[in-house]
Amino acid sequence: MAETIENSHSDEKPKPRVRPIVRFGIFLVSHSFLVSIVCFTSGVLALFLLPVLAKNTYISENALMPGSASPMLSNQHVSDGNRLVKDLTNSNLKSSETGIESHKIIAQYMLDVGAEVSFHKFHPQMNQFHPLHFFSSPDSGKIQENYSCSSYGINTVGIIRAPRGDGKEAIVLVTPYNALTSSFGEVLSLGIAYSVFSLLTQVTWLAKDIIWLVADSQFGEYAAVSAWLREYQTPKFSSMSALNAEMCPDINNLFEIEVHSMAGSKFSNSFRRAGTMTAALVLKVRDQSEQFDDTISIYAEASNGQMPNLDLINVVNYLAVHRQGLRVNVEKLWSFLNLGWLKSLGEIFESLANIAKSLNPKFKFGIPATEYVEGTAILASSLYYQALGVPTGPHGAFRDYQVDAITLEISPKFSLDKVWRNDIILRGGRLIEGVIRSVNNLLEKFHQSFFLYLLTSPSKFVSVGVYMIAFALLIAPLPMVAASLYVDSNSSSNCSKGDSSTPSAITDTDEHGITIRSWRWLNSAKLVFIVHLWGAIVSVLPYFICQIPDCSPTTSFMIWVLLSILSLLILNSVLASPFACVKASQEKEWALVKSVTISSVFIGLGLMSVINFATAEIGALLMVPMCLLARPLKLDVRAGTFRSCCRIICNLVLGHIAFPPAAFFLLKGMLDGFGSANVGGFWMWVESLWAWNSATYLFIVKATYLSWMSKADARYQRNIFNIHSKKG
Amino acid sequence: MEKLKKKIRSFSFWNWVIASIIFRLILIYFPNNLNLSSRPEVSTPLTSFRRLSEGYWLKQLSMSPYAGSMYHGSPLLLSLLGPLTVKRIEGQPNHLLYSLVSVIADVVSAMLIRATGQNLQVAYFGTLKSFDLVKQIEGSEVHSPGDVAALIYLCNPFTIVACMGLSTSPIENMAVILCLYGACSRLIPLAAFGWVIATHMSLYPAILIIPVIFLLGRGPDAPPRKLFLQMHQEKGVLNQSKLPPCFSWGPIIHFAFWALLWSVYVLVLCGISLKQFGGLWEMFKSTYGFILTVEDLSPNIGVLWYFFAEVFEFFWNFFLIVFHANILFMILPLAIRLHHRPCYLAYVAVCSMLKSYPSVGDSALYSGLLGWFVNELSDMQFSLFLFCGYVGVSPLSPVMHNLWIWRGTGNANFYFATTMVYACLQIVLVVEGVSAMLNHDRKLRSLITGKPRDAKS
């Protein structure tokens, strides 16, 4: 074995046969410029082709059997729901200052149909960014110390125990409801949920417990749901509750009163649990409607671009379209619909598909141009929300505990008078009933269908295998360019050595003059590492800044900028300068720096594509051209040709655009006009991102240092130069 | 000037050592946030801290520490480290004493590596002198391999993670390094002690017997005798005194005697501590037996867990034999080829990828040992590629684990893909390292014989 290794690697002087794969690799590396252009453009093109390549969804799990049973929700249940709606609207008129009344009414209704009821009292917990919590499991030991008695919310929870189940599994139905400013839509959603709930207490087929959570949304829908989930999944055995009771006597009194007033045996003051959750549905009704049709919108994106299992969306889509005659919507970026070039692109694709069809009737991959534009808009919003990493609704809280959940938002066609209200309750209720019945059939948790996908319409999706190709094409140039730069810098240094030395010295240089020839990149790696370290420090800084009390966003942003510059200076003086005494020629040095940077970016993007694909895709779109174009400004200025001038301009523009604050301003300016954009806005935006522990946040900081990189190249050159001059 | 340079270098060496120690001490204060001790990359069933403290508790309750298949380490570790797992100091992090012990183990290993590296350098210069090649080295920059290796070992993130993850691998590594140090500096009892302890704790270091025999028999850097004869034939004079010593069996017999003594001693100690819990047989069954039969198929960064989860049970024994014999198959040809560089052979032996429960502590060890050959490996190919590979794989592994276990969107194949990449990286590292070493030898030979020889000779 050793002999074969020796053979394959030893021969340097004679050029023997090279294996085809090695030759192909050498070919790619030597033509890296051309190859990278081809790869990058094809990557962008493939991204735009995704709506064409989308497949129709299908229900993968056989056990679901959606729509196989006829709906049992009758007018009786609808009128039950209507009764609740009426009571709630009346109670609103009576006493709107405390929400406790309406919660009591809901609890009474739940008790009436024979469910177990409990209240869950929670304190809104601000999402705090903690630098070390990225990889730990969801809220391990996050205990909040200081409650304030004045602000608390009450979730009402009703549980139906399944007559056929063993109480080990449950389906959750969530209706956000703000008792203080209850809008009619929220009340109607309660009505729908109640009609389903009252049906489900009577049915015999139920094999999983049903939990109906009326989430108190006065602190935001997400906060209420996540507080309840935290309590459900990680029970506290500490003395917190006792302490709590001592601290806030008035709240406790309220509960005491309730317990007395409700004589129902099934009411309990303690926290009630059912089995593990199989799926969760969040139901909302929108107040004002601008739709021409009864539509139902599906929101699926959870934190960090996680999606629920595609089967859940499929079931909802199937039942809504084929059984209840509702239009199904997925979020889309409306501004994309009016883009002219997108439309023409769609037409081009359509005509291409037609030509292909005329050549061979078996080719059927074209889609109409309008459908293409719509698909692109949905795809763009899907990418955008996944990349942002902020959940689009309360369903995001469930995904943190591996529960598949979606938000359904019903927007009715007409204003909600009596007749239409009944209709909406009936159809919405039947939809929910159908979904619950399907999920009820499940034997295992959702696992059959996709978790990694992008939607291009409610019934079409792009799976991970397809969109990864586009991404791979996009980042394929990076390793190639890195390799070619590395090879170039190495071989040129060898050549210069060979030229300068006499034959007797050749052996000498071969022997020991090599001194770390192949390890020369270590210096550049050190530089890149320092810049990364700086990026890490900058990303952790906001955690400390937000500890400073009473700071307006603008000032804290200023502090952030100042501190980051300061940290850069300190790092540079402490770490960089002692090692800057590199003897290698500077022209070679920047190539190595670039090569190491590009490979680190490649690693980062590859990692990111596993964590959150959409972020990686958008990041690749921004960073890959920047990486490929980056070149020290000084060299370009010295060259002074037209081409280098173009490159300088491209570099500067890209470097500035991709710098996150700049990018933020540009985007905001395009969307809302430049007047509204200010520095504080960026701070708020960043704050919202880290509040969600978003991986995007990490990534943005990465982008920051990257855009600095091209400048850092030039800066670093100068640094080295200075040190050399001092020495000399 | 030269002295000044040396001074600066040694100064920065100690600086770095102190910086790495301080960094470790800072990290001790965040053990819960980092959650390192529960990561499969850091703690394997053999080295896990939790299992150690479980074993200690079982022993305190006068039950067998091996009951319930929780603990699989040595009973001596229980007596030495066990009390530290429960001892707490008010107001300090939970496992302060234990982590301090690992930090000390790391520093001691680094110092031993440094001393061994200096030994090696001296031996290398001696060889060059005997070939009259010293002139060619002067003028060119030669890094002190001891310093480089020690710094690589101390500042390696893998070492730091293994140390902070409270695994026992720093101590196992220390035993291995102790063995090599003893063999290099001809302290035969120490070498035997290190070898016995390392073998006792994790079985695989038993292979080190081959490099240790070469080291003791021939010295740390012995060029082939044939080369000498060849060189002197050309010059026409044969200076007997300059010839390298022949293979001497004396130290080896000495070593065998000491190894026997130490192993009897260790076994007696183990026997005493396990007297009421089934004795030595129980210990062998649940340490060596556990290692050899790969009972625990929970994921780690090796490849065996996945393989044995897939394989039918009646093929199990066959594949166990194949995999373990494979280590010997790889070592024996290399031992013949690299017999004149026993330390390098030791490095190759240490990074056996076919361990049943590997952890990052192992790669910390072999990357430290790789630093000894910084001058020889200076023109290794693919160094940037390997570096990037390691940098890429090390965060990929927790990410894939997170996708599989926490998010539920991935599956076991995701994690296994990472471990495959890791194994491939190690293979490339070994292959490239060995080929760079052979190239270096070839260059030396061509310098000695005076004519560039055909590469394929």
Image (cartoon, helix red, strand yellow):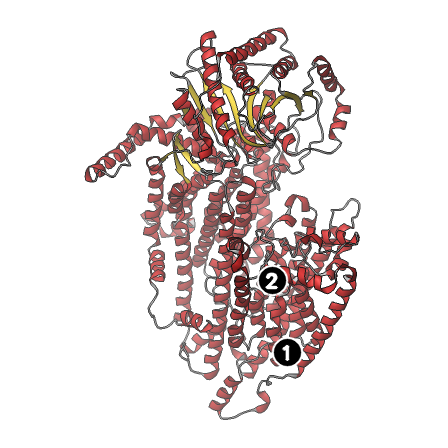
Residue A667 at x, y percent in the picture: 44, 31
Residues behind callouts 2 and 1 on a single chain: yes
Q: Nearer the viewer, residue A107 or A642?
A: A107
Name the spot of residue A144 as percent of width and height, x first.
69, 31
Question: Is B191 or A126 nearer to us in this picture?
Answer: B191
- The amino acid on which the numbered mark 1 sits, given as a three-letter code, is Leu
**CA neighbours of label 1 inside 10 A, class few (<14), some (14 to 19), many (20+):** many
> What amino acid does circle 2 point to?
Leu
At 37% across and 72% down in the image, what residue appears? A13
Residue B214 image point, x, y percent? 60, 77
Disc 2/disc 1 C-alpha distance (Å)? 29 Å
User: Which chain letter matches label 2?
Assistant: B
**What secondary structure is found at the residue carrying circle 1?**
helix
Residue A191 or residue A187, whichever sits in front: A191
Which residue corresponds to mark 2?
A: B292
> Could you say which disc has been placed on residue B216 in the image?
1
Tell whether B272 sits left or right of A425: right
Q: Which chain is mark 1 on?
A: B
Using the image, determine if residue B452 lies above or below residue A28.
below
Q: Is residue B217 above or below residue A290?
A: below
Specify whether residue A408 is in view: yes
Helix, strand or loop at label 2? It is helix
Asked where in the image residue A45 lies, by quadrant, the reply is top left
Report the disc number at residue B179: none
Query: Mark 2 near mark 1, Cβ–Cβ under 8 Å?
Result: no
